[in-house]
């Protein structure tokens, strides 16, 4: 049902390039995880860890001709999942354009989608911190796409500029004033793993393999 991972990597590389071209800032080296590099001990933290193994799933019952119900928590994650899926999947992205994944609260429509989902793909590493309580009820069907990467720890003040640029529409001029206010409101200290892993092409490639592996079980 799923296309081969090798056939979509080029599309993902293009997706990353377009995201960067639309104004996403280049993060500092200490904020950019690398799926292949082994960071030294001074850059790691005992909490800066992604899961090491993907959960197992039983095949979904689609005998009535229904589609696989898939939920992704963020826009970027939904875009990557869409590259891996086909017409047999009904994909629901929770995060509206321009919303901050750190503070977004699920709506009743989101909760219905989570309830009906066969699998829920999340970034993890604390990105969906305001959704955490709601997502706990669906832990059995939740997959952290950062499984298998070695995340990098960070601390101190961290502005949510990455999300403001990466999760918004491409019309920067019309949203510039709102973005400035949002970034000022959401500056706060982070500890543990840096969840902004999508700036690494190697990490997004790992996402793709993880998503394809899980969907192949379903």
Image (cartoon, rainbow, N blue to C red):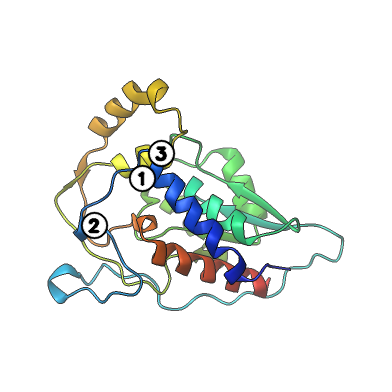
Sequence order check, earlier mark of 3 and 1? 3
Query: Secondary structure under badge 2?
Result: helix
Instruction: Locate the C terminus by quadrant.
Output: bottom right
Task: Give coordinates of residue 70: x percent, y percent.
Answer: 63, 56
The residue nearer to you, when weighing 73 against 76, is 76
Sequence order check, earlier mark of 1 and 2? 2
Residue 138 visible at all? no
Query: Secondary structure under badge 3?
Result: loop
Q: Which disc number belongs to residue 31?
A: 2
Q: Which residue is mark 1?
A: 102
The residue nearer to you, when weighing 57 against 171, is 171
Which picture quadrant has residue 203?
bottom left
Whether residue 67 is situated above or below residue 113 in the rendered picture: below
Residue 152 visible at all? yes
Whether residue 14 is situated above or below residue 150 in the rendered picture: above
The residue nearer to you, when weighing 4 against 163, is 4
Q: Which disc number belongs to residue 22?
A: 3
Report how far apart the C-alphas of labels 1 and 2 lie in the structure: 17 Å
Task: Answer left or right for 112 relative to 197.
Answer: right
Residue drawn at x 43%, y 50% is: 17
Task: Give coordinates of residue 109: x percent, y percent.
Answer: 61, 40
Instruction: Locate the N terminus by quadrant.
Output: bottom right
Task: Answer left or right for 43 relative to 27.
Answer: left
Task: Answer left or right for 2 relative to 104.
Answer: right
């Amino acid at each position: 049902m799923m296309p081969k991972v090798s056939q979509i990597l080029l599309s993902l590389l293009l997706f990353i390039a377009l995201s960067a071209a639309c104004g996403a800032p280049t993060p500092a080296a200490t904020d950019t995880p690398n799926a292949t590099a082994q960071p030294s001990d001074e850059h790691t933290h005992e909490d800066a860890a992604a899961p090491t193994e993907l959960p197992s799933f039983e095949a979904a019952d689609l005998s009535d001709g229904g589609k696989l119900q898939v939920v992704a928590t963020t826009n970027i994650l939904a875009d990557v999942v869409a590259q891996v899926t086909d017409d047999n999947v009904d994909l629901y992205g929770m995060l509206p354009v321009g919303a901050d994944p750190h503070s977004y609260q699920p709506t009743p429509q989101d909760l219905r989608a989570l309830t009906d989902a066969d699998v829920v793909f999340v970034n993890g590493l604390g990105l969906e911190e305001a959704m955490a309580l709601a997502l706990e009820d669906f832990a059995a069907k939740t997959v952290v796409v950062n499984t298998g990467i070695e995340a990098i720890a960070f601390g101190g003040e961290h502005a949510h500029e990455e999300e403001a640029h990466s999760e918004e529409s491409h019309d920067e001029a019309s949203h510039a004033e709102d973005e400035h206010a949002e970034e000022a409101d959401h500056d706060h200290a982070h500890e543990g793993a840096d969840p902004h892993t999508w700036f690494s092409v190697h990490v997004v490639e790992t996402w793709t393999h993880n998503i394809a592996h899980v969907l192949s079980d379903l």
